[in-house]
Image (tube, grey):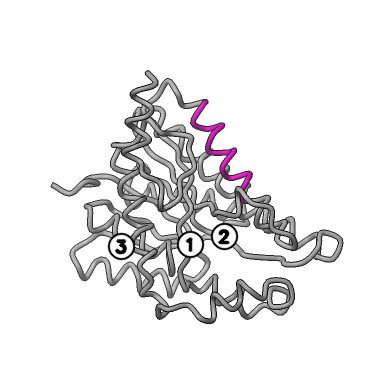
């Protein structure tokens, strides 16, 4: 039997990159997947590919910077597929790049609407049902930027730090339920987000080593092994096997089984 059989998954930023890879793996494991992003043609292409392989998928246009769009998208998903069992907050933006006194404050704040407000709103809409059913899992795709200081990347680092704390707070509030919440670093892949970063004039000005890493990436777009590794990590967390680690932030190199064993040994 497939690990996620009979469950409904909602995945943001699912038209490409990590979101697409996660959606495809969830579908392979039996979940009905709702793909969200602003580009409906991209979503339709991914959904059709999943359906061609025997899976169940729909695309729902959603601007995660717009609270009304989020509310409408969640309602649409539940109307078509049923209550959400798995939520993956994957949508994100890389910039703006530059010193705090140099970036556009409007752009900086919009990044927080995507990184912080959107995950909070999606959880606000789906957690009541998860709590009522006493079943569900939420994964926020954070970043290694959540634990480093990166000058000229304040919007991204702040948003990712806040995502990790939002996950920890939610997990503490859900401690008496069977609903688990996690944050992960997806790894490094030649995604469109990376391409957008490499094309940004400010990123090229302030992040020359990163731009070189992107431009000299050894894998073609869409073929990076970290896409599959990230998707598998999400399947593992969605399976329920690691619910005892709820509230944590994990990178791909982290050994979840070892952390479970350590937790058990500590009582």
Q: Is residue 13 left or right of residue 25?
A: right
Marker disc for residue 13 = 1
Please report the bounds of the magenta region as a residue range: 160-172
Marker disc for residue 92 = 2
The crowd level at tag 1 (other Cα within 10 Å; few <14, some 14-19, many 20+) is many
Q: Do the residues labelled 2 and 3 touch (CB within 8 Å)?
A: no
- Does residue 16 lie above or below 29 as drawn? below
Q: In this view, does 104 lie to the left or right of 80?
A: right
Which of the 4 quarters of the picture holds residue 258? Answer: top left
CA gap between label 1 and label 2 equals 7 Å
Element type at marker 1? Answer: loop
The crowd level at tag 3 (other Cα within 10 Å; few <14, some 14-19, many 20+) is many
- Residue 209 pos. (x, y %): 63, 73
- Does residue 146 lie above or below 219 as drawn? above
Residue located at (36% from left, 50% from top): 234
Q: Earlier in the sequence, mark 1 or mark 2?
A: 1
- Residue 88 pos. (x, y %): 43, 50
Q: Earlier in the sequence, mark 3 or mark 1?
A: 1
Give the residue at the far left of this rendering.
Answer: 1
Residue located at (61% from left, 71% from top): 210
CA gap between label 3 and label 1 equals 13 Å
Let me know if residue 69 is in the magenta part.
Answer: no
């Amino acid at each position: 039997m497939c690990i996620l059989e009979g469950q409904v998954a909602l995945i943001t930023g699912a038209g490409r990159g990590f979101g697409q890879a996660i959606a495809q793996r969830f579908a392979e494991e039996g979940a009905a997947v709702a793909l969200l992003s602003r580009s409906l043609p991209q979503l339709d292409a991914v959904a059709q590919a999943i359906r061609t392989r025997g899976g169940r998928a729909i695309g729902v246009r959603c601007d995660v910077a717009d609270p009304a769009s989020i509310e409408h998208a969640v309602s649409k998903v539940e109307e078509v597929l049923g209550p959400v069992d798995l939520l993956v907050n994957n949508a994100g933006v890389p910039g703006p790049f530059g010193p705090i006194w140099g970036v556009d404050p409007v752009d900086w704040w919009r990044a927080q609407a995507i990184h912080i407000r959107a995950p909070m709103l999606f959880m606000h809409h789906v957690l009541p049902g998860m709590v009522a059913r006493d079943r569900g899992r939420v994964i926020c795709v954070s970043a290694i930027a959540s634990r480093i200081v990166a000058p000229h990347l304040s919007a991204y680092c702040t948003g990712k730090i806040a995502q990790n704390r939002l996950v920890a707070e939610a997990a503490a509030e859900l401690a008496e339920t069977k609903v688990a919440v996690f944050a992960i670093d997806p790894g490094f892949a030649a995604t469109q987000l990376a391409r957008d970063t490499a094309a940004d004039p400010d990123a090229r000005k302030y992040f020359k080593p990163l731009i070189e890493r992107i431009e000299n990436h050894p894998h073609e777009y869409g073929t990076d092994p970290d896409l599959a590794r990230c998707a598998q990590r999400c399947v593992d967390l969605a399976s329920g096997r690691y619910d005892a680690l709820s509230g944590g932030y994990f990178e791909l190199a982290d050994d979840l089984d070892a952390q479970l064993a350590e937790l058990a040994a500590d009582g």
